[in-house]
Image (cartoon, grey):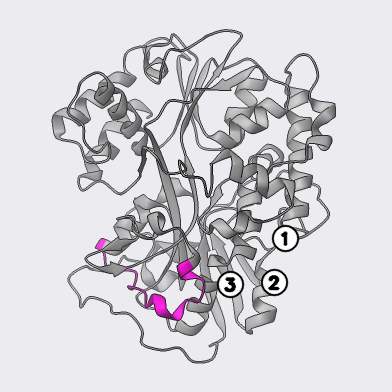
Amino acid sequence: MTVVSASAAGLLTAACGGVGDARDVSAATAAHATAAHATNAARATNVAAASDAGGQGGTGATTTPSPPDSASASPAASPSGPAPTPVASLGPGEGTLKIMALDGYAEWGGTDPKVKWTTPFEQRTGCHLSISFYDPATEDNPGAFAPSSFDVISATPELGGRLVADRAVAPLNTSLLDNYDGLSGRLRGLPSVKQGGQVYGAPFLWGTNQVLYDSRTTRPGGPEALFDDRGPVLFRDTPLSLADAALVLASRGGHVKDPFDLTPAQLDAAAGLFAKEAARPGARLFWRNPAEVVQAFATGRARLAQGTPYQLDVLRRGGTAVRGLPDRPVTGWADSWMVSAQTAHTSCAYKWLDWTASAEVQRKAAAWNGLAPANPAACLSKARAIRRVCADYRVGGAGAFSKVFFAVRPPDYAQWVDRWSRIAP
């Protein structure tokens, strides 16, 4: 296996990538929430997640993410060419498979030597892996993510929409994926992976946003508190956070049917909500690393945050007074694996998609990343790590997807990026 540009999570990042055993965090559940307590909870979380992800625990060493592989900077595909078509059949593995992944989605043991699901894939299939990682913040860089730079890619909804529009990824023949039918039907039908009757992505991990708050300092009445509170308030640093503002507009009588499909006036109104308290220095903060939310609450530097159910779980087990609003509707997202329209390694690419759709791999990936598995069978385990993640996101329950608006790349995404650049420059 070759790792082209490794991007490994740090201690708290890894903590936000797996749920620990209750007995492991007892030392961190003291009377008051401090940074040390959050670190202890994080360390225990990482150990338990590593155990569930294929080992007995690990060091959780902190490393600095590297930039994406330079191969991704070649010119992008032109959508004017012929549309790619699904393959009809598969042959034997063809050798090296180039994987471009989000951090934590193709674990090879770089963060923790016990956490890896890439090595067993190589051993079982004979396909050699060359892995590179990318920063989601680079998703709209001109020329990035050319189809020649990867064979398979783990795509966010924003990136996936761009790749489909650019004809950079090929539609899938799902009959060649044995584990595809085990994936959630709701996720398989999302417009981020299925367009024009064609399937372009196999869902992998998903999550939902939730309003978190420090119950010692504030008691919000609803999601609008994110925009009305004096702060500090933490927001996820992505243009799609505008959709959460759009849901607040809808709750106030605005005619918003889909928070990811806004008129220009609605988009301006959503952006305007962020400006209400933004003039005060430090009132509005923006995070990209999940650890930043944990650290901010643990050290008393946040009153509210746009977070996730898993982050809430980590903070509560760490002994903090952080609570979460149960209100729905909420926004969510589902990341998926896609195949390059120019891959010369189709068989290995399909073997990887089938491998990552399996309950076995999704169980490990969900526990490590603190996100819900797209395959509900991944939750059928006695391991506490995955059971806790599945409980956080209600996986398999009747209400798991109730009132969740899943992200899709807006048709006028450039306008969303423009508005966000003024909010979080």
Q: Residues within 10 Å of mark 1 (few under 14, many from 20)?
A: some
* Residue denoted by label 2: 119
**Label 1 vs 3, first from the N-terminus:** 1
State yes or no: discs 2 and 1 in contact (Cβ < 8 Å): yes
Residue 335 % position (x, y): 45, 54
In the image, which disc is placed on residue 130? 3
In the picture, the quarter occupied by the N terminus is bottom right
Viewer can see residue 61? no
* Residue denoted by label 1: 109
Question: Which quadrant holds residue 365?
Answer: bottom right
Q: Disc 1 to disc 3, how far (Cα)?
A: 14 Å
Q: Residues within 10 Å of mark 2 (few under 14, many from 20)?
A: some
Residue 425 % position (x, y): 37, 30
Q: Secondary structure at mark 2?
A: helix
Residue 308 falls left or right of residue 340: right
Which amino acid, mark 1?
Answer: Gly
Q: Secondary structure at mark 1?
A: loop
Residue nearest the viewer, comparing 308 with 150: 308
Q: Main secondary structure of the magenta part?
A: loop
Q: Is residue 190 above or below residue 311?
A: below
Q: Is residue 407 above or below residue 330?
A: below
Viewer can see residue 317? yes
**Label 2 vs 1, first from the N-terminus:** 1
Question: Which quadrant holds residue 315?
Answer: top right
Residue 390 falls left or right of residue 192: right
Report the mark closest to the observer, 1 or 3: 1
What residue do we see at 64% from left, 71% from top? 2
What residue do we see at 41% from left, 79% from top? 175
What residue do we see at 72% from left, 48% from top? 49
- Magenta stretch bounds: 165-181
Which amino acid, mark 3?
Answer: Ser
